[in-house]
Image (spheres, rainbow, N blue to C red):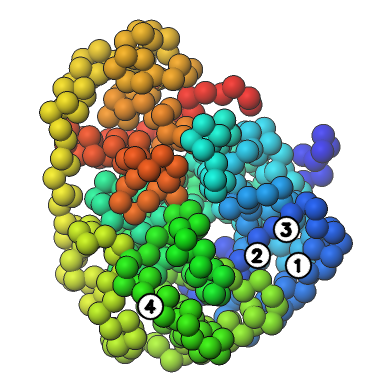
């Protein structure tokens, strides 16, 4: 490992994944999770090789793999390590994920070097998911290296990575949605060149994201993550076991009904939904999809064929919309009765060139009297805290801001809310696991970062939230 840097080839190299996005080709990334370390490595490598051969052989769409370890729940091979089993001549076509969970910054650097050494040049960092069943205390004990920090490492690495950012657009309060959007912009400012969404089914949210970025002239290639469901996956979604994935009551009823279908009918329903989503993504201006749930070569090929046919079937937005509306009828896709959409009249037209959408006002931030008092007091006491030593006024910070004694005070940049109280100790915005109502995936009370956005909205300081990339607070282990 010590000689790794010396082995890296820094010469000009091709990157066919980046080239395809830049050329406006619609790409298909077939998602594959890295296996547990207790699996036979040779057998795992053979399985990956078989999937790679099948995917690269797909005709009619630019298909390659996305190797992910972002949701690892057991001791799995890290994606950067596992991806070394891909064929050397095709690694520039694939994408690998790099999860920050249980990974220190130094370990992250090693994984980045492993990727560079192997020629895996397309990397999507993610801060990482919690382990289902972990308590708040257990989550706090884990290391979560923030995706923005990893992006900065990738950007400064001489290898010249092409990195992506993740975003969860399926948020239904103004603050949780804007928290995701602001964090995405920070990621783009930290070196991300494309973005991949969280998985979901609400096409209005995908179009809102497209409109938001277009409205800000942020023309980055966007890839929507979709899932081909199996009955087991439906059961897990209904049980709320997928971090960051929530569904509406209407959609839940549809899935419950489909669970009672025969296997053939169930599969047909899933493929039709996938076809409509994939074709819709292209017509909404997405550059591709990342498809989870097709890890066997045969299934990946069938899914790809269905997608290719759907792309041929729907080349016109109105035709697609008619079919999509008749398929979903009046299904409400928002998981809450009162839900926030940034734009009206989404899914009635593609991006309107001459009729730019006007964003809706965020709802009343509902800041209580006690919150106003607390904010004003903290602002009075800590307005210069980012320029002072972190232990300055520590006692007052503990009393009035719940200070957790970190090394870098960032209160003035976070609406005077101490973000060290986020169980993952993320500094720059909400993680992808935040619930659609803005509650924390771990504590189930308001996500710290949604509170930061809500207070900033009340204080008239929303635009400032994108201004600074904040460093982590505690660097106990490098
Ligand atoms: S950011 Fe939070 S934990 Fe760190 S010094 Fe400020 S108040 Fe304390
Ligand atoms: S407070 Fe927010 S960012 Fe932190 S773990 Fe909870 S949902 Fe994620």
Looking at the image, the residue that sits furthest to the front is: 260
Residue 368 visible, this angle: yes
Tell me whether circle 3 and circle 2 mark residues in contact (CB < 8 Å): no
Q: Nearer the viewer, mark 3 or mark 2?
A: 3
Question: Quadrant location of the N terminus?
Answer: top right
Separation of disc 3 and disc 4 at Cα? 32 Å
Q: Residue at x 74, y 46 (%)?
A: 114
Mark 3 secondary-structure assignment: loop
How far apart are the alpha carbons under marks 2 and 4? Answer: 27 Å
Marks 1/4: CA–CA distance: 34 Å
The residue where tag 4 is placed is 254
Q: Position of residue 99 (x, y in %)?
A: 59, 47
Q: Which mark is nearer the camera, 3 or 4?
A: 4
Of the two numbered discs 2 and 1 on the same chain, state the one appearing first in sequence. Answer: 2
The quadrant of the picture showing ligand 1 is top left
The residue that mark 2 highlights is 32
Other residues around mark 1 within 10 Å, as few (<14) / some (14–19) / many (≥20): many
Nearer to the camera, 17 or 267: 267
Percent x, y of residue 420: 43, 27
Is residue 389 among the parts visible in the rendering? no
Residue beneath label 1, please?
48
Among the two numbered marks 1 and 3 on one chain, the one whose residue lies closer to the N terminus: 3
Could you say where residue 213 lies in the image, as x and y percent from the top left? Answer: 33, 58
Considering the image in quadrants, where does the C terminus appear? top right
Q: Is residue 228 above or below residue 92?
A: below
């Amino acid at each position: 490992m010590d000689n790794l840097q010396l082995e890296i080839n820094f010469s000009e190299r091709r990157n066919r994944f980046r080239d395809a996005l830049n050329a406006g080709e619609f790409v298909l990334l077939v998602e594959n999770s890295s296996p547990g370390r207790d699996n036979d490595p040779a057998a795992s490598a053979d399985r990956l090789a078989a999937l790679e051969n099948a995917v690269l052989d797909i005709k009619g769409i630019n298909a390659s793999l996305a190797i992910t370890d972002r949701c690892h729940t057991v001791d799995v091979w890290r994606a950067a390590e596992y991806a070394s089993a891909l064929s050397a001549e095709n690694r520039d076509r694939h994408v690998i994920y790099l999860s920050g969970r249980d990974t220190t910054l130094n370990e992250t650097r090693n994984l980045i070097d492993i990727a560079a050494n192997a020629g895996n040049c397309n990397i999507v960092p993610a801060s990482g998911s919690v382990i289902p069943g972990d308590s708040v205390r257990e989550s706090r004990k884990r290391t979560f290296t923030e995706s923005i920090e990893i992006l900065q490492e990738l950007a400064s690495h001489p290898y010249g990575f092409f990195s992506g950012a993740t975003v969860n657009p399926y948020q239904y309060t103004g603050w949780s949605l804007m928290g995701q959007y602001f964090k995405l912009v920070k990621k783009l400012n930290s070196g991300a060149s494309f973005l991949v969404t969280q998985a979901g089914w609400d096409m209005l949210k995908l179009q809102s994201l497209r409109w938001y970025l277009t409205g800000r002239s942020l023309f980055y290639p966007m890839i929507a993550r979709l899932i081909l469901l199996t009955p087991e996956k439906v059961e897990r979604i209904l049980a709320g076991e997928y971090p960051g994935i929530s569904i509406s009551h209407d959609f839940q009823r549809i899935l419950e009904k489909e669970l009672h279908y025969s296997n053939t009918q169930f599969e047909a329903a899933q493929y039709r939904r996938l076809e409509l989503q994939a074709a819709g993504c292209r017509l909404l201006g997405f550059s591709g999809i990342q498809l989870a749930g097709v890890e066997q070569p045969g299934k990946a090929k069938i899914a790809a064929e269905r997608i290719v046919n759907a792309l041929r079937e729907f080349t016109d937005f109105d035709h697609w919309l008619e079919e999509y509306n008749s398929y979903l009828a009046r299904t409400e896709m928002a998981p809450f009765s009162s839900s926030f959409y940034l734009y009206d009249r989404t899914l009635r037209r593609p991006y309107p060139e001459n009729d730019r959408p006007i964003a809706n006002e965020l709802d009343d931030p509902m800041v209580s009297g006690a919150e106003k008092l607390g904010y004003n007091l903290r602002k009075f006491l800590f307005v210069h805290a980012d320029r002072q030593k972190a232990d300055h006024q520590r006692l007052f910070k503990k009393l009035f801001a719940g200070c957790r004694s970190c090394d870098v005070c960032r209160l003035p940049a976070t609406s005077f809310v101490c973000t060290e109280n986020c169980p993952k100790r993320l500094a720059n915005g909400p993680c992808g696991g935040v619930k659609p109502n803005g509650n924390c995936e771990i504590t189930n009370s308001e996500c710290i970062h949604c509170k930061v956005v809500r207070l900033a909205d009340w204080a008239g300081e929303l635009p400032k939230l994108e201004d600074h990339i904040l460093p982590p607070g505690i660097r106990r282990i490098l």
